[in-house]
Image: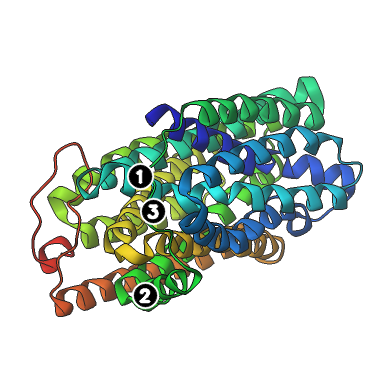
């Protein structure tokens, strides 16, 4: 199971973000401004945001495994076809289709892990899954960054498509199935689960965090190539090294559970968002070392907050709406990526890097307020969190006030 889910994460996120290091080259070849070039990322993540909830609901009816397997296989095939797109508009159309295909994995994976492992194991497994997803995003970006000079951007995308296909085949052949329920839920049951997932105030706070944190994060990374190659004059291959900061994201994701066990969800999530703001501020001077350090810091902060919010949403989700809660979380997450990534590039074109960092700080502050509101609602409600904190050692269940501190 670990091999299958890790391979699925590598496939999905390598394919989803592979064009990101190529945005300056795409802008140059097709005479695009940064906002228009960033659509190569935004249309895929936007399509993912739209498709993730329907596919999560579909998994309630046809099963989790078929949706995950179909997702990775179709997205990998589209990744191999992407370099053949004759125009930028055709490339955007194929990216939309790829985003829809990719949606099946992130929309279903947390629910699959919860049903496979039970409450005691899901939080730690979600952290490990996020770490695998992080490595996928890192490998896709670096593979493109290091092969573009030798193969051109078409060849670089083909390399990532090949990596994606290998990972998809591993997932398809190794992913364990789930026990078939005695009865499949009806459409009405799915709708009730969706209503429950959309009306829980603690879950709503996690959706807000997903929206603003991912939007801020992708906005900064979308524009990073333009800043490093334009403002700071780096070679594109050298500029792509900024994506090595993603390695810190894998570490932060895997360590988030231990921080939650020690400090609580609220403190850990807020600290992650504050760290993201601090990292963004560190990139303001026109200094390559400071920019690099800032991206490491903001990446650590973002993935800490995301891991906590994602695991919190999985824990809080009602049993009848687990898939729908995961779908809503991921819909907000990738809607943030789509809208935030495009808006950030446009803002950079008009207000520069300083304006973008200021906007990011404001958006993340909203996320902090949402987390604090989750603490108030969770404590007032007096419910059990339903899940121990993430990490290799589990803590006993307790009052929601303890877990939401």
Image quadrant of residue 366? bottom left
Q: Which residue is mark 2?
A: 196
Q: Residue at x 18, y 63 (%)?
A: 385
Q: Which mark lies nearer to you, 1 or 3?
A: 1
Q: Measure the alpha-carbon separation of dots 3 and 2.
A: 22 Å
In the picture, the quarter occupied by the N terminus is top left
Residue 278 location, x and y as percent?
Answer: 38, 54
Residue 306 numbered mark, or none: 3
Would residue 32 be found to the left or right of residue 102 on screen?
right
* Element carrying mark 2: helix
Would residue 305 be found to the left or right of residue 16 on screen?
left
Q: Residue at x 37, y 52 (%)?
A: 181
Q: Residues within 10 Å of mark 2 (few under 14, many from 20)?
A: some
Residue 113 numbered mark, or none: 1
Q: Earlier in the sequence, mark 3 or mark 2?
A: 2
Would residue 290 be found to the left or right of residue 44 on screen?
left
Residue 168 location, x and y as percent?
Answer: 58, 31
């Amino acid at each position: 199971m670990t091999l299958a889910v890790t391979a699925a994460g590598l496939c999905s996120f390598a394919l989803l973000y592979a064009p990101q290091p190529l945005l300056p080259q795409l802008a140059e070849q097709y005479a695009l401004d940064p906002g228009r070039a960033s659509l190569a990322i935004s249309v895929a993540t936007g399509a993912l945001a739209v498709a993730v909830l329907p596919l999560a609901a579909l998994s309630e009816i046809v099963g989790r495994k078929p949706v995950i397997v179909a997702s990775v296989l179709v997205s990998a095939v589209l990744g191999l076809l992407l370099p053949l797109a004759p125009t930028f508009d055709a490339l955007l159309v194929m990216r939309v289709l790829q985003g829809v295909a990719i949606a099946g994995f992130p929309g279903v994976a947390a629910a699959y892990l919860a049903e496979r492992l039970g409450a005691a194991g899901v939080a730690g497994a979600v952290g490990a899954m996020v770490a695998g997803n992080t490595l996928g995003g890192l490998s896709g970006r670096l593979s493109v960054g290091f092969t573009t000079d030798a193969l051109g951007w078409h060849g670089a995308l083909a390399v990532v498509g090949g990596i994606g296909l290998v990972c998809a085949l591993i997932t398809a052949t190794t992913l364990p199935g789930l026990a078939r329920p005695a009865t499949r839920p009806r459409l009405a049951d799915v709708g009730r689960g969706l209503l429950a997932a959309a009306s829980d105030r603690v879950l709503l706070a996690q959706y807000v965090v997903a929206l603003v944190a991912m939007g801020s994060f992708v906005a900064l990374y979308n524009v990073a190539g333009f800043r490093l190659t334009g403002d700071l004059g780096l070679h594109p291959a050298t500029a792509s090294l900024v994506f090595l900061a993603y390695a810190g994201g894998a570490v932060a994701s895997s360590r988030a559970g231990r921080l939650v066990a020690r400090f609580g969800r609220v403190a850990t999530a807020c600290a992650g968002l504050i760290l993201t703001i601090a990292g963004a501020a560190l990139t303001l001077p026109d200094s390559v070392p400071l920019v690099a350090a800032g991206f490491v810091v903001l990446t650590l902060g973002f993935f800490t907050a995301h891991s906590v919010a994602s695991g919190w949403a999985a824990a809080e989700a009602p049993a009848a709406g687990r898939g729908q809660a995961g779908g809503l979380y991921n819909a907000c997450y990738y809607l943030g990526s789509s809208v935030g990534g495009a808006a950030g590039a446009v803002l950079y074109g008009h207000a520069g890097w300083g304006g973008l960092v200021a906007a990011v700080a404001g958006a993340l502050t909203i996320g902090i307020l949402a987390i604090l509101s989750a603490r108030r609602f969770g404590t007032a409600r007096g419910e059990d969190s339903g899940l121990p904190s993430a990490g290799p050692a589990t803590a006993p269940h307790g009052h929601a006030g303890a877990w939401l501190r």
